[in-house]
Image (cartoon, coloured by chain):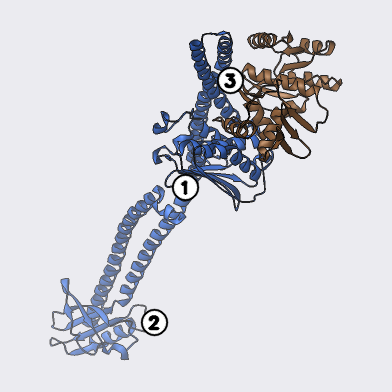
């Protein structure tokens, strides 16, 4: 998985194209070097052959056949590094002197250069190869002279050079690719680190920041900027939350006064028609007060202060108590109420808040399930958490709204008019679950909704106090 | 009955004082912690209503000081929600009940009456009797007019609480706190369903309805003869 990430990462692809261009440039440079070296080798060979031919003709003109024999003996001894072969023949190319037995059957190249293969040389020396390059000349007196040199050593040298150059190119590509992969991996790890942190932050823990210790340069600056941005967002978010909480707080006192005065009015009112109206007003005021109280309660839970009240909670009893409290309500609506309880151990938490959370879920399930429907409440143990679920066969929540229902005041459009409520119930449930380091998920119950709450068995909350 | 109210928010204080006077109590008001503590220690009161957050001396300290001096005057603590809700702390400090602001006056009145009465009859009781309804606490038996009926454990607890506070208004939150032992805010009136079930068993077939609903406040088990 991490490998595929490396290969698809921007850095890696950038480096691959970089290595490709580098290889092309290196190839061109190496080809040039090879051309120069090969040209140098061959012009050396040519000039040495020319030189030998000149010396051979001088020796022949001066001393005839004997001088040639001496010359040949001197120039083709086994101690010589490069072995030359000489031939002096008459006009009909019959042998006069030299260490070649006959005029070779040569192929003519440009500028009087000859090339031939010679198989029978094995008796004279150990031939490295049978390819020869030769040059001939005809003396004014008609004799023909030929100097030949095998050039396999030159070919070998150029092959060696070509091999070295090819290998260095392969090495360039391999090292470049490996280096690219490592660099990409390193930068990917840093980016991945930033990404996971951002994911955690997006999933709710806004106090989290990207760890900048140990990073330097661009990444540090990037992380610092992201952190600063997060600080700013957090300030704005808490600002917004505080404003709503403050409004709730400040409006509650006058609302209470209003409610109290209405209740006074109600007590002193003797006209039945007016009384009814006042009762309706009191109900409105109570609804508003309820909303404000719920808002403040959520704010209080979210602030984390409630952790000071954490104690051992028997989840089994707690869930059973919720069921016992709500079962008559479901029965009144003609709903079947099923429970699936496993025996579970104790959890460290706030029993009142947990009760409130489960009660809110059950309350919702009953509220949104039509008569004759079914509500199911279950408690089970998973390897590292307790799982509480509340499922119903009601109207459910459309996919698009699943994330939004946890927002304060959000209500699914279809339920807005039909069911009473303030849109704070699930927000509170989520706040409670978060306080206990748990998670909450909405699933499709086909039909209906299934809310699954998971609470860690070993709540780390106590250690955080 | 004399009640001392220690509350710094004057509009809340005025409202409580007015309501309590109308209900036939004598009320003294202290606007800060210090004068409240002085009044509470120097004069005799039947009950105290103490706000938690007070200037000079805070509410919990007042109650702790009184309890340390062996003064067992029942005390009701008022607290604004949004402050750290340490109900437990309040009760541990020696408070008899805890009420979160804002509250309906009926709620406050019901609770005051309960703590006043609790103080009166703290002796162990083995039988409860309201009109012809009788509860034998030892045998866990409930009869009305000599007829025994079966109650679920929770119904039994509910009836017991109502009988112990017969003639007093009992609010829904009081029932949740005392019968179910959870302090929470139900979104729907689940309690009503339990009450109507209980009513089915207690009152059905009898001319006299004992379990009454008090509009805007709660319920009351009628003991008027």
Q: Position of residue A436 (x, y in %)?
A: 61, 39
* Quadrant the C terminus of chain B occupies: top right
Q: Which chain is blue?
A: A
Picture layout, residue A24 above or below residue A234:
below
Task: Specify few, some or many for label 1: CA neighbours under 10 Å numbering under 14, 14-19, or 20 or more.
Answer: some
Write down the residue under mark 3: B215
Write down the residue under mark 1: A187
Q: Is residue A459 visible?
A: no
Q: Is residue A415 visible?
A: yes
The quadrant holding residue B177 is top right
Instruction: Point out which mark residue A79 bears.
Output: 2
Q: Colour of chain B?
A: brown
- Label 3 to label 1: alpha-carbon separation: 69 Å
- Label 3 to label 2: alpha-carbon separation: 130 Å
Q: Element under label 1?
A: helix
Residue under disc 3 on the same chain as residue under disc 1: no
The quadrant holding residue B80 is top right
């Amino acid at each position: 998985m991490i490998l595929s990430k490396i290969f698809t990462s921007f850095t890696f692809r950038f480096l691959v194209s970089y290595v490709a261009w580098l290889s092309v440039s290196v190839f061109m440079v190496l080809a040039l070097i090879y051309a120069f070296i090969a040209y140098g080798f061959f012009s050396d060979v040519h000039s040495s052959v020319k030189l030998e031919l000149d010396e051979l003709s001088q020796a022949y003109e001066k001393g005839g056949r004997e001088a040639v024999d001496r010359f040949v003996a001197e120039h083709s001894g086994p101690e010589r590094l490069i072995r030359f072969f000489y031939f002096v023949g008459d006009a009909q190319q019959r042998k006069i002197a030299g260490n070649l037995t006959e005029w070779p059957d040569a192929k003519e190249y440009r500028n009087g250069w000859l090339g031939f293969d010679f198989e029978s040389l094995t008796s004279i020396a150990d031939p490295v190869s049978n390819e020869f390059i030769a040059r001939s000349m005809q003396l004014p007196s008609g004799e023909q002279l030929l100097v030949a040199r095998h050039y396999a050593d030159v070919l070998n040298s150029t092959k060696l050079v070509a091999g070295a150059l090819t290998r260095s190119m392969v090495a360039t590509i391999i090292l470049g690719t490996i280096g690219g992969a490592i660099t990409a991996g390193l930068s990917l790890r840093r980016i991945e680190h930033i990404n996971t942190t951002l994911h955690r932050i997006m999933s709710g823990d806004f106090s989290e920041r990207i760890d900048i210790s140990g990073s330097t340069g661009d990444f540090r600056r990037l992380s610092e900027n992201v952190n600063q941005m997060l600080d700013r967002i957090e300030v704005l978010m808490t600002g917004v939350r505080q404003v709503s909480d403050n409004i709730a707080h400040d409006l509650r006192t006058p609302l209470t006064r209003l409610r109290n005065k209405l209740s006074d009015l109600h007590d002193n009112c003797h006209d039945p028609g007016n009384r009814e109206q006042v009762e309706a007003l009191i109900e409105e005021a109570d609804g508003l007060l309820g909303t404000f109280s719920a808002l403040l309660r959520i704010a209080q839970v979210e602030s984390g202060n409630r952790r000071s009240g954490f104690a051992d909670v028997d989840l089994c009893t707690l869930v059973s108590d919720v069921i016992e409290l709500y079962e008559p309500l479901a029965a009144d609506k003609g709903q079947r109420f099923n429970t699936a309880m496993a025996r579970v151990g104790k959890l460290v938490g706030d029993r009142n808040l947990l009760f409130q959370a489960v009660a809110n879920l059950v309350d919702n399930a009953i509220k949104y399930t039509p008569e004759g429907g079914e509500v199911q409440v279950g408690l089970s143990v998973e390897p590292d958490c307790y799982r509480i679920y509340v499922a119903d066969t009601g109207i459910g929540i459309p996919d698009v709204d699943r994330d939004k229902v946890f927002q304060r005041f959000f209500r699914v459009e279809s339920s807005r008019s039909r069911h009473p409520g303030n849109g704070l119930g699930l927000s509170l449930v989520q706040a409670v679950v978060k306080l206990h380091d748990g998670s909450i998920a909405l699933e499709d119950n086909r039909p209906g909704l299934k809310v699954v709450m998971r609470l860690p068995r070993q709540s780390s909350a106590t250690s955080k106090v | 009955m004399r009640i001392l109210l220690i509350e710094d928010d004057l509009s809340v204080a005025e409202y409580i004082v007015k309501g309590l006077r109308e209900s036939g109590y004598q009320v003294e008001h202290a606007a800060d912690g210090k004068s409240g503590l002085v009044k509470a220690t120097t004069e005799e009161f039947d009950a105290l209503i103490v706000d938690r957050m007070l200037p000079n001396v805070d509410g919990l300290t007042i109650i702790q000081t009184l309890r340390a001096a062996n003064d067992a005057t029942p005390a009701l603590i008022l607290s604004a929600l949004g402050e750290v809700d340490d109900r437990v702390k309040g009760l541990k400090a020696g408070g008899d009940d805890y009420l979160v602001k804002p509250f309906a006056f009926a709620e406050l009145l019901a609770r005051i009456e309960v703590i006043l009465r609790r103080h009166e009859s703290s002796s162990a009781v083995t039988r409860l009797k309201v009109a012809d309804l009788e509860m034998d606490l030892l045998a866990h038996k409930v009869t009305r007019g000599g007829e025994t009926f079966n109650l679920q454990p929770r119904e039994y607890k509910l009836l017991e609480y109502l009988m112990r506070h017969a003639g007093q208004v009992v609010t829904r939150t009081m029932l949740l706190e005392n019968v179910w032992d959870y302090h929470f805010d139900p979104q729907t009136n689940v309690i009503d369903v339990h009450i109507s079930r209980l009513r089915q068993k207690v009152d059905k077939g009898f001319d006299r309805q004992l379990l009454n609903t008090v509009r805007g406040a709660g319920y009351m088990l009628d003991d008027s003869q």
